Image (spheres, helix red, strand yellow):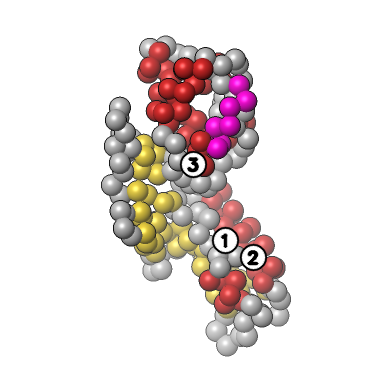
Amino acid sequence: MPTIILSAHPARRYERETLTGTQIEYGQKVVPSVCIEARTVPEIAEQARAFGASVFTAAPRVSFLVSVQVARGERKPRGFDVADRAGQFHDADWIHSEVESPVRHVDGPGVRMWGSRFAPFQMDGQEPFWPGAEPDDFTSPADGSVGLYGYLRAINARVQRCTDSWQSLPSLAHEVPLHDRYGARVHPFDVAVELLARRLSPTVTAA
């Protein structure tokens, strides 16, 4: 059975106006590499995902790439290279993608990082939004997505600023598909305006 080496290297993805790329620090490792044995591509993918999840737990705020390599001298499982090129080993799931020159919103900063299930949402010039150790009003609606969690927090902050109050997002939204707004990359300020204009009833649904 082939031996597979799994490694986690610091990495970041950048988005420019005409170019998207990834910087990977192959000389550095977030955690020590591990060796697994797997006979098929699905087995490798499952264990690579589990490895990435364990790295995320150990270093939750680090942007990293999972490297999947067959040990020297051993034969690759059938379909390995095709699966690797197609991203089936979840190697990029934990990379943070940054917009290097965010388009400024008419009322404030643009978005520097939209995030993902494992990467944070960040407004330009501000710190990324990360879930706290304890659940809050946005934990359940975010449904485990770090990026969506931060997006909801950003909308909430804008609502409070616009109303000059401590009014929270759950008091305005009811069955509003905020995950759709997030997926479409609608700026949090625009969503806040929409919610305030509609003055909807309690509880937010974004799962």
Q: Which mark is residue 90?
A: 1
In the rendered image, which quarter contains the N terminus? bottom right
Asked if the residue at tag 2 contacts the one at tag 1, i.e. Cβ–Cβ closer than 8 Å, the answer is yes
Q: CA distance from mark 3 to mark 2?
A: 28 Å
Residue drawn where x is 30% and y is 53% of the image: 17
Q: Secondary structure at mark 2?
A: helix
x, y percentage for residue 32?
Answer: 51, 64
Q: Hey, what amino acid is under mark 1? A: His
Q: Hey, what amino acid is under mark 2? A: Ala
Label 2 Cα neighbours within 10 Å, binned few <14 / some 14-19 / many ≥20: many
x, y percentage for residue 202?
Answer: 60, 16
Residue drawn where x is 45% and y is 13% of the image: 166
Residue 54 visible in this rendered orientation of the protein: yes
Counting residues from the N terminus, which is met first, the one under dot 3 or under dot 1? 1
Q: Quadrant of residue 107?
A: top left
116 vs 162, nearest the viewer = 162
Q: Nearer the viewer, mark 3 or mark 1?
A: 3
Tell me: 34 left or right of 78. left
Q: Which mark is residue 184?
A: 3
Q: Which mark is residue 45?
A: 2
In the rendered image, which quarter contains the C terminus? top right
